[in-house]
Image: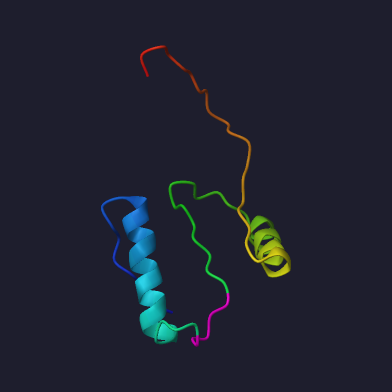
Amino acid sequence: LAFANPGKERQGSVENGLKKLVETTGNGDGSGGCDFVAVHDSARPLVTIPEICHVVSDAKEYGAAVLGVPCKATIKESEDG
């Protein structure tokens, strides 16, 4: 188990996590001990174990997967953005 520092934005956090992964599993040439990476957006903490298992299963079958769920909040559009 390893922890990476957060970034200013989510993309920075993901980058730091991937760098930590390379540090702990291999030398960056693909010879490390990791076949898949899971990134969780902690702003949405109610992901379930079955959802995680399903997305991991799909990643193994198809090479990549993303979990999407219907939006539960109101979304409004305006002409001025």
On screen, residue 5 above or below 33:
above
Q: Which residues are magenta?
A: 31-35
For residue 2, say whether it is visible: no
Residue furthest to the left in view is: 8
Question: Seen in the image, is 24 located left or right of residue 59?
Answer: left
The rendered magenta stretch, by its main secondary structure, is classed as loop
Q: How many marks?
A: 0
On screen, residue 27 above or below 38:
below
Q: How is the image coloured?
A: rainbow
Estimate the x, y position of residue 76 in percent, counting from the top left.
48, 18
On screen, residue 58 above or below 23:
above
On screen, residue 48 above or below 78:
below
Residue furthest to the top in view is: 79
Q: Nearer the viewer, residue 74 or 28?
A: 28
Residue furthest to the right in view is: 61
Image point 58% across, 31% down: which residue? 72
Estimate the x, y position of residue 46 in percent, counting from the top left.
55, 49
Q: Magenta span has 49?
A: no
Q: Quadrant of the C terminus?
A: top left
Estimate the x, y position of residue 68 in percent, counting from the top left.
62, 45
For residue 13, say whether it is visible: yes
Q: Nearer the viewer, residue 53 or 10?
A: 10
Q: Nearer the viewer, residue 53 or 46?
A: 53
Image point 53% across, 65% down: which residue? 38
Q: Quadrant of the N terminus?
A: bottom left
Question: Seen in the image, is 61 located left or right of residue 36?
Answer: right
Residue furthest to the front in view is: 29
Image point 43% across, 86% down: which residue? 26
Image point 57% across, 72% down: which residue? 36
**Quadrant of the rendered image containing residue 50:** bottom right
